[in-house]
Amino acid sequence: MDSIGLIREFLEERLGVTPEGVVPAASLAELGVDSLMMLELIFEFEDRFGAKLSSGLATPKTVGEMVTLMDSLIAEQKS
Amino acid sequence: MGQRRVAITGLGLVSPYGGDLEDFFSRLIAGESAIHHLLTDDVPRPLSMPFVSCPAFDPDTALGKPLASMMDRFAQLGMAAAFAAWDNAGLSRGNESGTDSRERWGCAWGTALGGTLAYEKGYRELWQQGRERLSPLTVVLGMNNAANAHISIQLGLGGVSMSHTVACASSAVAIGEAFRRVRSGEASIMLTGGSDVPQAYGVARAWEALRVMAPGNAENAAFACRPFAADRRGLVLGEGGAALVLEDWAHAQARGARIHGEIIGYGTSCDHSHLVKPEVAGQIRALKDTLTDAGLTADEIDYVNAHGTATSEGDPIEIAALRCIFGDRASRLAVSATKSMHGHLLGAAAAIEAIITVLALREQTVPPTAHLQEIDPACAGVDHVTSARRQPLRAALSNSFAFGGSNAVLAFRAAMPETR
């Protein structure tokens, strides 16, 4: 599964958000991701991809930013 | 500031029968048991015991996914009960603006176990599934004040938000403390009640180890809990949530709210002698304090919803305390233990029983102790109601006597006819 797929699945399962609305420009806050849900989403990502997000990183604001962050970590993991 | 009368304007619960409040009471009146046989798929030793569950309760449907996913089941049951009570009181959800500020309205909630299930899930993941870390939500799911915190957020209550953990008296204390705040004028509305989920594996096993749990199988589980009966075998645990809206009488009248009944007294005590062996003297103190607090004499009480868990030791002590308080009139005092039907909800027990007591007064009908055929001579001396009975009821008590020796009693009065 790719990053956007994981985000879509997570938001549908946890918040009942329809996957069609989870597009790169969408604001995570508007989709219902508050600071706690963000922690849980990062946890889920780390779990699935065996990656570790540095706690010093700026918190992504949009789905697109989250995807970019996740993709870069996955790439790092592979290199 | 003078003392206010305190109206009960909202009642709500998650019914083990699956229906609404009226359905719940009508089934109790019919003597119908909600107890079933619980058989889990835990390996290697499943839970197998009489139990009360709320199988029709779907948190995603009741609360919506975003809210439900932030809660452990005890908070889900509590939130659903609170919403039901709030709707029942005719109050709007969410933060109100305007004249009727909710900044001083509060929530007092009872739970014995809190989010034990969330922690149990954590243990299972760490120890059984070999995982190395837990969901970051575990703390906010597991904390004992999760239910009241969610309730205060969802209903926009800006005053005190607190949880009370006093074993089987948790929600009696929560209701009593909420009552005092409305009576004093500190809050014109308090949402109160309790919720608990005792089917955490470790919790249910721990109760089994105490040897106070009634045995039963798929055929006879419904009749497993028989308070005051000669053949009683112990208590039956259950999950649930129950909530009440307590409101300043004048406030309730001003907005034209339906008043189900009045809460008039609250008394507490501690046996200060033994953790699990109840004592007559301690229970008498709580009963006397409650009557004094309510400004009533024992002669004005027409019904007692007993703590009545169906343990060999607890039931006779409670009856002895009632006989002492009610004297010659004890034999004519209607008493019933509805745990025979809805089970023992631990921290939610007093809340569900408070609702039943209020409905008994409102409907002028005493619900029965189910499955009580032969009364234990040690429990004799009061008027055990074994099938529902209509009779004039002016005021009633609801007893909660907890492990730890903590006793709490609530007193209620039927709403005056002109306010009904």
Image (tube, helix red, strand yellow):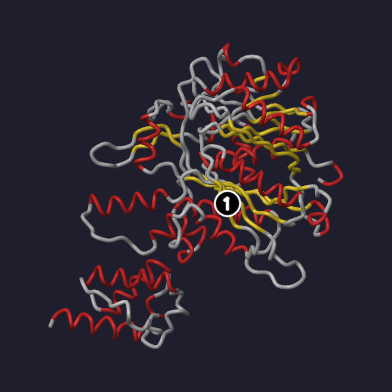
Which residue is the extreme one toward the left?
Answer: A79
* Residue at 28% over, 78% down: A54
Q: Chain of mark 1?
A: B
Amino acid found under the numbered disc labelled 1? Ala
Image x and y of residue B189, in percent: 71, 56
Q: Is residue B409 above or below residue B129?
A: above
* Residue at 23% over, 50% down: B128
Left or right of residue A20: residue B101: right
- Quarter of the rendering occupied by the C terminus of chain B: top right
Image x and y of residue B400, in percent: 60, 34
Name the residue that disc number 1 marks: B81
Q: Is residue B96 above or below residue B359?
A: below
Quarter of the image for residue A5 reads bottom left
- Quarter of the rendering occupied by the N terminus of chain B: bottom right
Q: Is residue B143 above or below residue B112?
A: below
Quarter of the image for residue B373 reads top right
Quarter of the image for residue B297 reads top right
Q: In the rendered picture of this protein, how many numbered marks are placed on residues? A: 1
Tag 1 secondary structure = helix
Image x and y of residue B201, in percent: 35, 42
Left or right of residue B209: residue B334: right
Which residue is the extreme one toward the top?
Answer: B377
Which residue is the extreme one toward the front?
Answer: B272
- Foreground residue, B24 or B4? B4
Q: Is residue B3 above or below residue B286?
A: below
Circle 1 residues within 10 Å: few <14, some 14–19, many ≥20: many
Image x and y of residue B359, in percent: 69, 39
Left or right of residue B368: residue B116: left
